[in-house]
Image (tube, coloured by chain):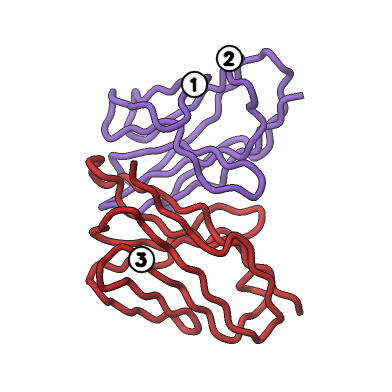
Chain colours: A red, B purple
Amino acid sequence: GQQVMQIPQYQHVQEGEDFTTYCNSSTTLSNIQWYKQRPGGHPVFLIQLVKSGEVKKQKRLTFQFGEAKKNSSLHITVTQTTDVGTYFCAGPRKGAGNMLTFGGGTRLMVKP
Amino acid sequence: DGGITQSPKYLFRKEGQNVTLSCEQNLNHDAMYWYRQDPGQGLRLIYYSQIVNDFQKGDIAEGYSVSREKKESFPLTVTSAQKNPTAFYLCASSMQGTEFFGPGTRLTVL
């Protein structure tokens, strides 16, 4: 079946360091979405990438969609304590309309 | 103010009791979903509904039931058949494939 995997599962960084999480799908995706869940909170939509090789930026966050549309990455520069949380990627489920399959998430912890 | 509401935020129940979690949205979304999240884990799909009066089992439906009598409402019942019901339950609705989540209900079964 379709799988969406994320690595690493956990990442500790010192405040000011950069951070990257990687998302890999077993199937080609029509789009990839990223969500952020703060500790104790709920996932919040960050961005959607649609085109092969697409790169989008949101301040210190850079999102990439791979050329083959099977992988994606989220890179955060100069991490801050406000970046703490779990970052999930998600892609459309095969044969299920607009439903999503979520990756397992990468939990980011930032040491001040 | 549009959004998704879930109540209550925290819920405690004794083992063997059924409990119903509320999920309401005023975003006019057709599709709604229920996810379960265990500590430090990802999101697992319990049930989903693409339209009123229709719903389908997700990946971990055993021990749960839902109804979708109104577009705005998608309540989830955790039955006594669910072996490990203690978890964080998230409801979501979607428009064009992007999901919007409610604040969640933390269920603890004692």
Give the chain letter at badge 2.
B
Q: Position of residue B66 (x, y in %)?
A: 43, 23
What's the mark number on residue A108? none
Q: Which residue was labeled with disc 1? A: B62
Contact (Cβ within 8 Å) of mark 2 with mark 3: no
Give the chain letter at badge 1.
B
Q: Which amino acid does label 3 sit on?
A: Asn
Distance of mark 2 from mark 3, alpha carbons?
A: 38 Å
Identify the element where label 3 is drawn.
strand
Contact (Cβ within 8 Å) of mark 1 with mark 3: no
Identify the element where label 2 is drawn.
loop
Report the quarter where the N terminus of chain A lies.
top left
Q: Which residue was labeled with disc 3? A: A71
B72 sits to left or right of A69:
right
Q: Which residue was labeled with disc 2? A: B81
Q: Disc 1 vs disc 3: which is toward the camera?
A: 3
Q: Position of residue B86 (x, y in %)?
A: 67, 31
* Location of residue B13 with respect to A52 vertically, above or below: above
Give the chain letter at badge 3.
A
* Residues beneath discs 2 and 3 located on the same chain: no
Q: Which residue is more in the foreground, A111 or B31? A: A111
Q: Which residue is more in the foreground, A97 or A26? A: A26
- Residue drawn at the location 37% of the way across and 35% of the way down: B72
Q: Where is residue A78 in the image (x, y as percent from the top left)?
A: 60, 86
Q: Which residue is more in the foreground, A39 or B3? A: A39
Dot 1 crowding, Cα within 10 Å, few <14, some 14–19, many 20+: some
Identify the element where label 1 is drawn.
loop
Distance of mark 1 from mark 3, alpha carbons?
A: 32 Å
Contact (Cβ within 8 Å) of mark 1 with mark 2: yes
Q: Which amino acid does label 1 sit on?
A: Glu
* Location of residue A42 with respect to B49 vertically, above or below: below
